[in-house]
Image: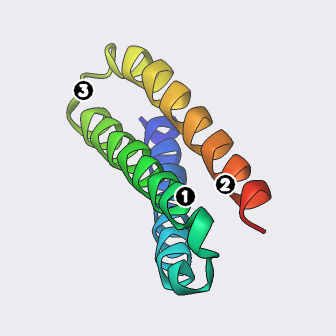
Amino acid sequence: MEKRNLYMEKIGRKLIQYNAKLTEMKGKTAEVQVDMKLEYLSQVDNLEKKRDELIKKHGQLTISSQRGWEDVKTGTEKVWDELEEAFAKAATQFK
């Protein structure tokens, strides 16, 4: 149970970081060149959707049984990896 709680806390901390990054990105929208603005906003929207999916998985971890949480954890890690990759891609694309 402790391992599960530590994992959920780790995700919770990452979600706080993702929210901060998204807020920062939204604040920079005005700085983006006009021809890149639609792509930038699309990336932000995509990141928000992936973040929301991670929030949902985090909630599922909370209510899953002790046995079932490993299955949910596997799905959570997949979403988490996708979100990390999407943030990395956005960071390099819009420097």
Q: Can you say whether 62 is above or below 70 in the image?
A: below
Q: Amino acid at mark 3?
A: Ser
Query: 24 or 34, which is in the foreground?
Result: 34
Query: Residue 64 has which mark?
Result: 3
Residue marked by disc 1:
14
Q: Work out whether mark 1 precedes mark 2 in sequence or the reverse, and give the earlier one.
A: 1
Name the spot of residue 88 as percent of width and height, x first. Answer: 72, 50
Displayed quadrant of residue 12: bottom left
Q: Nearer the viewer, mark 2 or mark 3?
A: 2
Q: Work out whether mark 3 precedes mark 1 in sequence or the reverse, and give the earlier one.
A: 1
Q: Amino acid at mark 1?
A: Lys
Tags 3 and 1 touching, CB below 8 Å: no
Query: Residue 90 has which mark?
Result: 2
Q: CA distance from mark 2 to mark 3?
A: 32 Å
Indicate left or right for 54 with 37 as reference. left
Tags 2 and 3 touching, CB below 8 Å: no
Q: Nearer the viewer, mark 3 or mark 1?
A: 1
Q: Secondary structure at mark 2?
A: helix
Residue occupying the far left of the picture: 63
Q: Residue at x 26, y 33 (%)?
A: 60
Tags 1 and 2 touching, CB below 8 Å: no
Name the spot of residue 40 as percent of width and height, x first. Answer: 55, 61
Name the spot of residue 37 as percent of width and height, x first. Answer: 53, 67
Q: CA distance from mark 1 to mark 2?
A: 17 Å
Query: 16 or 92, which is in the foreground?
Result: 92
Q: Residues within 10 Å of mark 2 (few under 14, many from 20)?
A: some
Q: Residues within 10 Å of mark 3 (few under 14, many from 20)?
A: some
Q: Amino acid at mark 2?
A: Ala
